[in-house]
Image: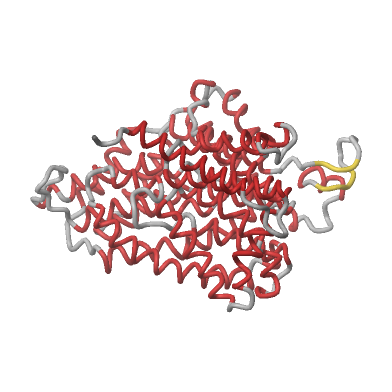
């Protein structure tokens, strides 16, 4: 008799528990404390369940503080739960809620339709318009939600183009998939994954890396800082992905797309002007995004801004304008700005709590569990022990080889597990080996840790070969307009090409662009 899903879940959980018990019972290795050994056992437990999918990701995350406390890594639960209150978690909550407002009034859909109506003059440009719209929206809205919104639009476009040329557009076999169908659906998924790299709230791995750098190194990457990292990567890799899809892998041919372009224009016209509440949401979002960027531009203030005003606006240890003593977080601190936007939406009579609350709470809990685990590794010295034990062989390796190995490893891991889970597992390890490989990289220990962690976080969004790798891949595959073989063929090519491109781009920018801006 075939095992039931419940039996499989119990078997995998039992295997995770047995492995955890075994790691905890082994003699403590030299250089590692008993608490560090139990932190490693907890990592095995969580990673095993994340990779196998035995439990939902968020449920596994909730077991982390339980295990850390039960095994004595923490004396009580308060520090074990501290990761769930990290400020960057609340930034992501704010980002999700702002996205709900954009979706409620169809602002995201209008942006997509506008791009399609303006750019879709040929099959290739139609695919590019879909990818650009998806990537831009994914910078601000969950890439899963963006893909879920854009896939029906892409399917509607295909009905206008492919159907007019006598090719069936249903998903029932036997079905002749056209290159345009495959390229557009893959482009939607890949556009969402790549676009999310641009901003701190664009995709969970970005926030995971930023949060763990802050917790483990007390190094803060602001919204504008990440934009300087992520936006150039998107500007290079998105056109490259489009070119590979439409000129090499799945060239769409010479089809008449005038109907699709006209349909996008008609749909946009039928929706009419944005209602007053929608306009207020657009303004609140625009102001929030602007303040997020301005908050990272304190270096432009120079000497013309009084020190107390600078501290009040951008944060610092000096006196502030409020007379509350020395030090202030800064009114332009991106988490503060993001959270302030939520009551602004309610006060503007655009959103109620019922509209705000349906967000991806599972991802929020996953963040918290990952931060708890990273804190435990830092507290017990387990990160340094793992780094020295498993990565010391890389000391002295060429820089390009080192960065390429990190990028390829993360992409490979992401193909078989959630990109958020991959970043959660790998980020503290990459931060930990910063000190070990600082000399090899020619950077300070902090600089090396930031370099490797950011490289790993970015790479987690570039797994393109399997539906399980990222939520956008799964959503696009679920449309029924492409087969796994299509995604596998394109994904293998893009994975290899993007590994080389990311390695070169990250190395170039970290040594020649970012040092003057981020260090």
User: Of 29 and 510, which appears nearest the observer?
Assistant: 29
> Residue 471: x, y in percent?
40, 45
**Residue 52 is drawn in which quadrant?**
top left
As displayed, is residue 393 above or below residue 311?
below
Q: Residue at point 63% right, 44% down? A: 373
The answer to which of 382 and 281 lies nearer the viewer is 382
The answer to whether residue 188 shows anywhere in this view is: yes
Q: Quadrant of residue 453?
A: bottom right
The front one of 371 and 193 is 371
Q: Is residue 396 left or right of residue 329?
A: left
User: Residue 85: x and y, percent?
Assistant: 67, 35
Residue 284 visible in the displayed image:
no
The quarter in which the C terminus is drawn is: bottom right
Please name the residue shown 21% across and 61% down the image.
252
Q: Is residue 43 left or right of residue 108?
A: right
144 in relation to 358, above or below: below
The residue lying at 43 percent from left, 31 percent from top is 105
């Amino acid at each position: 008799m075939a095992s039931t899903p419940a039996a499989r879940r119990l078997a995998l959980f039992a295997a995770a528990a047995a492995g955890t018990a075994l790691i905890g019972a082994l003699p403590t290795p030299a250089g590692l404390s008993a608490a560090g050994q139990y932190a490693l056992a907890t990592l095995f437990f969580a990673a095993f369940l994340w990779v196998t999918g035995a439990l939902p990701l968020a449920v596994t995350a909730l077991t982390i503080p339980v295990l850390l406390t039960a095994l004595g890594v923490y004396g009580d639960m308060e520090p074990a739960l501290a990761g769930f209150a990290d400020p960057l978690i609340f930034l992501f909550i704010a980002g999700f809620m702002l996205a709900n407002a954009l979706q409620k009034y169809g602002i995201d859909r209008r942006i997509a339709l506008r791009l399609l109506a303006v750019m879709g003059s040929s099959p290739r440009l139609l695919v590019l318009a879909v990818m650009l719209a998806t990537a831009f929206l994914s910078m601000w809205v969950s890439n899963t939600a963006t893909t879920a919104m854009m896939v029906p639009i892409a399917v509607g476009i295909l009905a206008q183009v492919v159907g007019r040329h006598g090719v069936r557009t249903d998903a029932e076999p036997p079905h002749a998939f056209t290159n345009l169908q495959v390229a557009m659906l893959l482009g939607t998924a890949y556009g969402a994954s790549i676009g999310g790299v641009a901003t701190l709230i664009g995709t969970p791995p970005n926030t995971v890396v930023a949060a763990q750098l802050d917790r483990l190194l007390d190094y803060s990457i602001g919204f504008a800082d990440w934009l300087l990292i992520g936006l150039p990567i998107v500007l290079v890799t998105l056109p490259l992905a489009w070119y590979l899809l439409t000129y090499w892998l799945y060239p769409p041919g010479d089809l008449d797309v005038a109907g699709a372009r006209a349909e996008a224009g008609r749909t946009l016209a039928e929706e009419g002007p944005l209602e007053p509440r929608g306009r207020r949401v657009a303004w609140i979002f625009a102001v929030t995004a602007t303040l997020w960027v301005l908050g990272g531009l304190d270096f432009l203030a120079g000497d013309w801004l009084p020190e107390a005003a600078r501290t009040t606006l951008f944060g610092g240890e000096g006196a502030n304008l409020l007379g509350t003593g020395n030090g202030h977080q800064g009114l332009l601190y991106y988490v503060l700005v993001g959270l302030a936007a939520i009551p602004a939406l309610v006060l503007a009579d655009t959103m109620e709590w019922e509209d705000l609350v349906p967000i991806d709470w599972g991802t929020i809990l996953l963040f918290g569990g990952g931060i708890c685990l990273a804190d435990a590794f830092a507290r017990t010295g387990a990160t340094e022990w793992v780094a020295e034990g498993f990565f010391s062989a890389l000391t002295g390796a060429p820089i390009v080889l080192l960065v390429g190995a990190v990028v390829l490893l993360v992409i490979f891991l992401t193909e078989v597990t959630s990109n958020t889970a991959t970043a959660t597992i790998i980020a503290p390890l990459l931060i930990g080996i910063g000190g070990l490989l600082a000399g090899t990289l020619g950077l300070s220990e902090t600089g090396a840790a930031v370099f490797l962690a950011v490289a790993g976080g970015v790479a987690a969004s570039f797994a393109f070969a399997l539906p399980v790798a990222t939520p956008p891949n799964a959503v696009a595959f679920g449309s029924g307009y492409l087969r796994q073989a299509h995604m596998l063929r394109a994904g293998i090519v893009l994975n290899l090409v993007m590994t080389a491109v990311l390695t070169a781009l990250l190395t170039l920018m970290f040594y020649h662009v970012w040092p003057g801006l981020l260090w």
